[in-house]
Image (cartoon, rainbow, N blue to C red):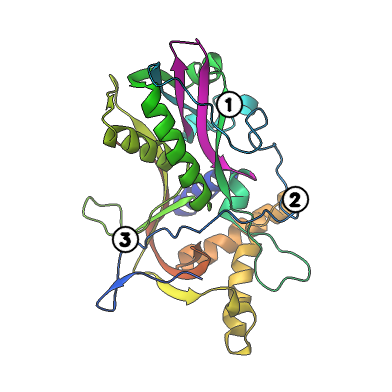
Amino acid sequence: MNYFVYFIHLVLHCWIVGLVVSSVNGKQVWPVPYERVDSRPDVDPFCQALYPFCPTGDPDGRIPVMTDSDVISVFRLQTPVWEFKYGDVMGKFHIMHDAIGFGSSKTGTNFTMEWYELFQLGNCTFPHERAGVSAPFWCNQGAACLYEGIDDIHWKQNGTLEKIGEISGEMFNEMARWVQEDNETGVYYETWTVKSDSGLNATTWFESYDCSQFVHRTYKKLLDMGAELTSPTPTYYTKIYLYSGEPVRLGNDSIFQQSSTKDLATDIKKFYHSFRSHQSVVEMIESLLEAFEKMVLEKTFYFYYNSEYWKLPMKYPYIKIIYEEIPLP
């Protein structure tokens, strides 16, 4: 019974919350490289956000230009997911959101920059069932958002707001150009990190692509430009892990259009049906039992990455949310 309760506990945490596969000499490369696009695709009107994306930021994603000689303070920001609505509830489970703050010494203006889901975490983690569409339908884009101001209470009360360095206005402008390019080509949010086990020498099959990854990419870009960034306190980030044996590549949406893969298509859709949105309490309990059967008893998780489906042969402990120390790059 404790084993079952443990699983339900983990799944509940997660609930609320064509690729050309790279190879060398025909051998699969792990982790599978995240695939970028040439330009950001249009958003399907079917995808709707419960909370509008970047409501006070520039609608076209423009970033203000700083005077080259300006001195810009850089801040590390972290707060529980949905802190604005639920306070520290998610923080108790170490489910945190990360961002970067900037402050101009010349104008006194502060800015917050973050990368997050266009349509909330659930839509990026599991697909929708859409009438008239044979394949699962994903609303899984994420994007960068920069807006004026740093809400001190929002970041400090249950999280972190600390200065980690200074950069010139010229560096800021170069970073801004990089952010806009990064934002145009890296567009799909990925919740999960998939590893072979929880040990130190585990193989990483897939990396997540989320708010903390954006923060680290930005830190690295600033350091590459010559910035000096240091944190007086340990830097911890939320990682949601799946544990599995070597993944098996299944294919893209063509799975759902071919008679030869009809059984596989049915099984994938049945799996995701357990994680559909807008369920009643009774339906949710039934879905949790179905997910337990699939992931623990059948040891199967269908994973979507780079617009393709993979079968993960699940291994104990199956799922973990870990708040782990990751030093500045």
Determine which of the numbered discs, if any, sits on residue 196 in the image.
3
The single residue placed furthest to the right in the displayed view is: 131
Q: Which of 92 and 156 is in front in this view?
A: 156
Of 114 and 270, the residue lying toward us: 114
Q: Quadrant of residue 53?
A: top right
In the image, residue 77 above or below residue 245:
above
The residue positioned 68% from the left and 31% from the top of the image is 55
Magenta residues, start to end: 97-119
Residue at mark 1 to residue at mark 2: CA–CA distance: 37 Å
Q: How far apart are marks 2 and 3 (CA)?
A: 34 Å
Instruction: Describe the element under mark 3 as helix, strand or loop.
Output: loop
**Residue corresponding to mark 1:** 147
Q: Is residue 174 magenta?
A: no
Which mark sits nearer the N-terminus, 1 or 2?
A: 1
Disc 3 marks a residue whose amino acid type is Ser
Residue drawn at x 35%, y 32% is 236
Looking at the image, the residue that sits furthest to the front is 68
Name the dominant secondary structure of the magenta segment.
strand
| 92 and 168: which is toward the camera | 168
Q: Disc count in the image? A: 3
Q: Could you say which disc has been placed on residue 280 in the image? A: 2
